[in-house]
Amino acid sequence: MSSSPSETATHPLQEFADHVAEAVGGTAEIQFDTVKVRVSNQNWIGAHATARDDLDLVFFSWLSAIDWTNDVEAGDPLDEEVDERIELMSALSDLTEGRLVVFSTDLPSENPTIPTLITTFAGANWHEREAHEMFGIHFDGHPNLIHLYLPDSFQGNPLRKSFPLLSREVKPWPGKVDVEAMPEDPSPDEPSTENPEA
Amino acid sequence: MTTIDPEVIRHLSETSVSVEIETEDMTLNIGPQHPSTHGVLRLVARVDGERCFDVQPVIGYMHRGYEKLSEVRTYPQITTIVNRIDWVSGYANEVPFIVAAEKLMELEVPERAQYIRLILTEMARIASHLVFNASYPLELGAATPLFFALRERERVLDLLESVTGGRFHPNFNRIGGVKPAYASGSNTRKLSQDLPAGFLAETHTAMDKVLEASEQLEDLVAGNEIILARTKGVGELPPEVAAAYGVSGPNLRASGVAFDLRRNQDYLPYERFDFNVITGEHGDCWDRWHVRLLEIRESVKIVQQAIDGIPSGDLQAKVPKVIKVPAGQTYVRAENPKGEMGYYLVSDGKSGPYRLKIRSASFSNLSILPWILEGALVPDIIAIMGSLDFVLGDVDR
């Protein structure tokens, strides 16, 4: 990913990020004030337990995933080729200073499987059910891995990029069409706010 | 050893049968359409006498797929979508999303725009907490507070509408600032790029009235013995359980955790204002009600301070006509009326996000239900559920 001026060694969160990464055995990166710690699949549960017990990251904020793929049916494809994978992410926070860490690990796009976090954070239950139906991730040991939002008979994983959005297949508006028709004078320094006649 | 007459034994055994009734567990289905569910929620509970066990919430009736939709929309279009997540405080949903996009664009938002965002966010919080103060006593059988609370909420919503044009779905934030009021054409835009005349003074007075009403509400509810009996010591939530489930906002503070994202995140300039973080002691239904009532007063304080100190200046930073957000990832979270609302934004430099994870407060707050309702009395289901103050649009997204 691209770099930004805020992403330097002197970032105020750098020390904290390095400390977390060292404690859980991962690597830290800071992007736009967000601390992300990459861990391995095998270390997924252990990293969370360490974060909770030793680093005071006791608040389970969320768990979700990103489908990195070159086969994009809905939305814009990526500019550059990526390694196809599912990036599983979870966010933990402390309840004192408001510091948050996003833990991230890579899973294969085909049959992604990882042990469940429920025994470490009970709140992972619904988040994992959501990630299961939306991305097809299998959480080993989850006691109730059924659909959360979608009907039981629903086929497919809607948040996979290869899952088409049927209404947009039929009619691309709104979205692509009105944006591409607009730029008659795209001079970037014009202090424009609205498209008044839109 | 004396022998007992078999007739007596038969009689005794029959008595014991009639005293200890053989009971069977019953499955109780609440919803999906139920007035206390604030949307469409179904609960399936196993009922043993007056106690319920294994409560399973069934959600998804309002799932609209906003995360997928965001992948085919442009950034300005997405504010329209996120408005509809927690529709009781639609304005507050927009802010963290817009701030996330601005962070990737490294935009400096004019101070006046930030103050307007802050004032409107706090007004949305007051409106949301007033809805809670209207509906929660009603669910427990007290109808009068509803009229006091909704009267004040109308006052706040009228003011919100005068600025944004919308009561529920303002769609007022723009990347780089806020929408200029009354901008309907290229000529008028330059003339009236600001809040409607008299808005600040009216809001200041309205806040005094809200403060007065919050005292009336406290008299009405806190002096009601039935409400006290139904809420004190009911549905206690220990802080460590709340944290493990990701329960946030007033529900977490009612359990005694003084954690407020307005204190430690920089999405809006809250550090300039003086306000208290309200906490409860026991984490029961009473504390959850009381924390929200007191938070109305803190929000009133913040709004009045912001009105007194609002700087003049632009409402918009310079942004290109077609907004493309540079590649990068960030997570921005905000203290919304219901709790932590955050957006994990992944951009690839296009006019729409590659992925937008929406972390909504009610989703995690509702996921505590199986834990908190385990072994609760059946009539307490409504008392406990109502005290969590969730909105199904915020659960299902």
Image (cartoon, coloured by chain):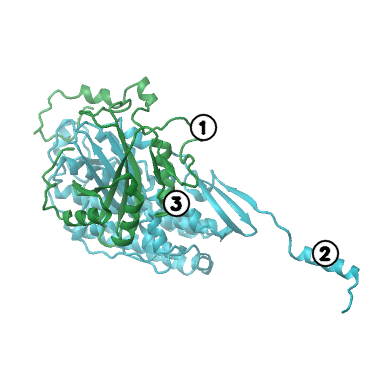
Residue B340 image label: none
What amino acid is found at the position of numbered circle 3 in the picture? Leu
Between the C-alphas of marks 2 and 3, the distance is 46 Å
- Quarter of the image for the C terminus of chain A: give it: top left
Residue B64 falls in image quadrant: top left
Is residue B33 shown above or below B144?
A: above
Q: Secondary structure beneath disc 2? A: helix
Which chain is indicated by disc 1?
A: A
Q: Secondary structure beneath disc 1? A: loop
Looking at the rendered structure, whether the residues under marks 1 and 2 are on a common chain is answered as: no
Q: Which residue is mark 3?
A: B366
Is residue A159 shown above or below B283?
A: above
Between the C-alphas of marks 1 and 2, the distance is 50 Å
- Quarter of the image for the N terminus of chain A: give it: top left
- Residue B83 image point, x, y percent: 33, 41
What amino acid is found at the position of numbered circle 2 in the picture? Glu
Of B193 and B98, which appears nearest the observer?
B98
Which chain is indicated by disc 3?
A: B
Of B158 and B238, which appears nearest the observer?
B238
Tags 3 and 1 touching, CB below 8 Å = no
Residue furthest to the bottom in view is B1
Q: Residues within 10 Å of mark 3 (few under 14, many from 20)?
A: many
Give the side of residue B142 with respect to residue A10, left or right: right
What amino acid is found at the position of numbered circle 1 in the picture? Ser
Q: Is residue B91 visible?
A: no
Q: Colour of chain A?
A: green
Q: Which residue is mark 2?
A: B14
Mark 3 vs mark 1: in front:
1
Q: Which residue is mark 1?
A: A153
- Residue B300 image point, x, y percent: 29, 60
